[in-house]
Amino acid sequence: MQAKPDLQDALGRQVFCFLTVCNGGKCMKIEKILNNNVVITLDDRQQETVVMGRGIGFKKNIGDRLDESLIEKVFTPNGSAMTERYQALLAEIPLTCITTADKIISLARQRLPGKLHNIVYITLTDHIHFALQRHAQGLDIRNVLLWEIKKLYPAEFAVGLEALALIAQRLNAELPEDEAGFIALHLVNAQLNDEMKNTLHITRVMQEILNIVKYHFRFDYNEDALSYHRFVTHLKFFAQRLLGSNYVDSEDDSLYQLVKAKYRESFACAGKINQHIAANYQHQLTGEEMMFLTIHIERVRSEISGT
């Protein structure tokens, strides 16, 4: 099978902003027709703007004015002009796929507390389009991180399940549960404003640390507990800093020594995590990182044990 072009690379890592109005209500002229449903115009600053709507480019010519009644979506790149490669990719995605992805993202913005980076409009639309193509060919991909995604990102996974229902309803395709996991990762990625490969690494690091704590104390997590959710949130940003080589430390050693002395068993568990990180990621945890890990571990441990 021919390799699919990477849409985020094609964008030149540009940031896209979706709008729901037509250039402030002003009438725009067509500069380029990508297909019957997608055309390119110029805004007031002479920047290229993508305008979408069913039949908006049908039987139109360069220089024609747009029929505003057909406009469903308008967006412009905040940066350099769009590449020919990007325009070719956009032209191949059906309008129904684009509008379905838009509804999924609107749902995610309502459900999730974190702010979504606007690049998700592009990356998620592209993913759904490719997933539909694979599904039609019987080439659904197994999500090897599905269990971790369910545990670590329950809110995003719930949106992913709702997304599958929307896709089934609007695009007539019953995608597997694995795709709910992939959609969840795109939403996590958009909240972290990071590359997908880093989001996958972050998820693995989080699960590794959770397993170390679980087997050190020989307990099962109460996944409904506030302490667990705080711990998972801490691990998410800890792993992001780790993989980005952005470390935190403080010159004040007194609080570190106090935590070390007061929570000896949780500190010992944090020490095991430090050994794992050093062996696998070539980083020794700073005193501040050890301290905060210890505090979060102690909260989880004490809530489960009742002490």
Image (cartoon, helix red, strand yellow):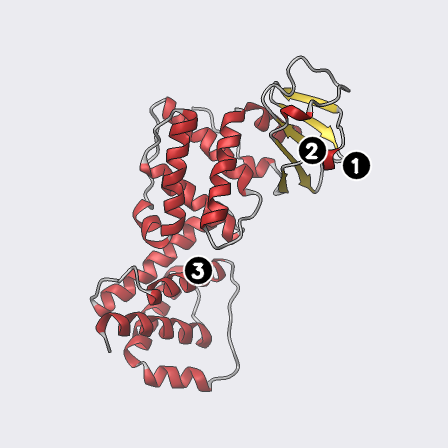
Query: Residue 229: x percent and y percent?
Result: 36, 62
Label 3 belongs to which residue?
Answer: 239
Horizontal arrangement in the rendering, residue 220 relative to residue 154 (left or right) = left
Q: Badges 2 and 1: C-beta atoms under 8 Å apart?
A: no
Q: Badges 3 and 1: C-beta atoms under 8 Å apart?
A: no
- Residue at x 43% of width, y 59% of height: 236
Residue 93 visible here: no
At label 2, which amino acid type do we have? Cys
37 up-or-down from 204: above or below: above
- Residue at x 58% of width, y 44% of height: 118
Residues packed near mark 2 inside 10 Å, few (<14), some (14 to 19) or many (20 plus): some
Q: Which mark is residue 22?
A: 2
Horizontal arrangement in the rendering, residue 189 relative to residue 48 (left or right) = left
Query: Residue 264: x percent and y percent?
Result: 30, 81
State the SS at label 3.
helix
Q: Nearer the viewer, residue 33 or 292?
A: 33
At label 3, which amino acid type do we have? Ala
Image quadrant in which you'd find residue 25 = top right
- Residue at x 46% of width, y 75% of height: 288
Query: Residue 243: x percent and y percent?
Result: 47, 58
Disc nearest the viewer among 2 and 1: 2
Q: Which mark is residue 44?
A: 1
